[in-house]
């Protein structure tokens, strides 16, 4: 019996095993609606962190996209009931932990929900519960 020759492991196989590629592979195996919602949340968070460097831009975004649950105001910007669902604007460690744990819970719960009920139902539940939460804030304001 002859010995097995040693195979040359090239750079390609090493690169394929990097953490970034492992994450990418794992991420793209997740259900599509979940992936999209998490990507939007993280992208908005990153943009908001950069906007902290430009106070006028940050204020504009907060004034028009974050939820301001004051009855007359919401009538003129009703999209806030949807856009606030994607706003994670707090900076520093607390803001990073906030979005990190929100996305972690979304992955844990959302992955199973989307596999059981489908992408369309997941989007519907995500948006309807978000709008419902915004309406509750509006109704419970003193």
Image: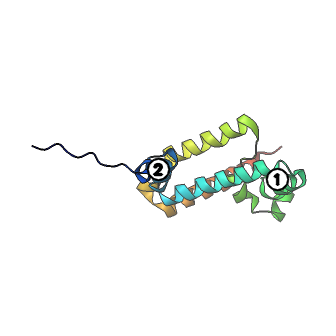
Dot 1 crowding, Cα within 10 Å, few <14, some 14–19, many 20+ = some
Residue 19 appears left or right of 77 = left
Quadrant in which the C terminus appears? top right
The type of colouring in the image is rainbow
Position of 58 compared to 93: left or right?
right
Residue name at image x 76 percent, y 41 percent: 91
Q: Residues within 10 Å of mark 2 (few under 14, many from 20)?
A: few
Q: Nearer the viewer, mark 2 or mark 1?
A: 2
Callout 2: helix, strand or loop?
Answer: helix
Which residue carries the number 1 mark?
A: 62
- Measured as percent of width and height from the top left, residue 100 is found at 62, 41
- Give the residue drawn at x 62%, y 58%: 127
Residue 12 image-quadrant placement: bottom left
Near-viewer residue (3 or 103): 3
- Marks 2/1: CA distance? 41 Å
Q: Which residue is mark 2?
A: 15
Chain-order first, disc 2 or disc 1? 2
Rendered location of residue 25, percent (x, y):
45, 53
């Amino acid at each position: 019996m002859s010995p097995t020759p040693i195979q040359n492991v090239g750079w390609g196989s090493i690169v394929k095993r990097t953490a970034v590629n492992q994450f990418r592979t794992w991420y793209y195996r997740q259900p599509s609606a979940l992936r999209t919602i998490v990507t939007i949340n993280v992208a908005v968070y990153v943009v908001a962190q950069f906007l902290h460097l430009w106070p006028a831009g940050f204020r504009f975004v907060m004034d028009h996209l974050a939820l301001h649950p004051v009855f007359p105001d919401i009538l003129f910007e009703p999209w806030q009931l949807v856009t606030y669902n994607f706003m994670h604007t707090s900076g520093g460690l607390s803001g990073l932990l906030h979005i990190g744990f929100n996305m972690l819970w979304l992955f844990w719960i959302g992955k199973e929900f989307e596999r059981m009920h489908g992408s369309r139902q997941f989007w519907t539940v995500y948006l309807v519960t978000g709008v419902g939460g915004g309406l509750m804030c509006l109704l419970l304001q003193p």
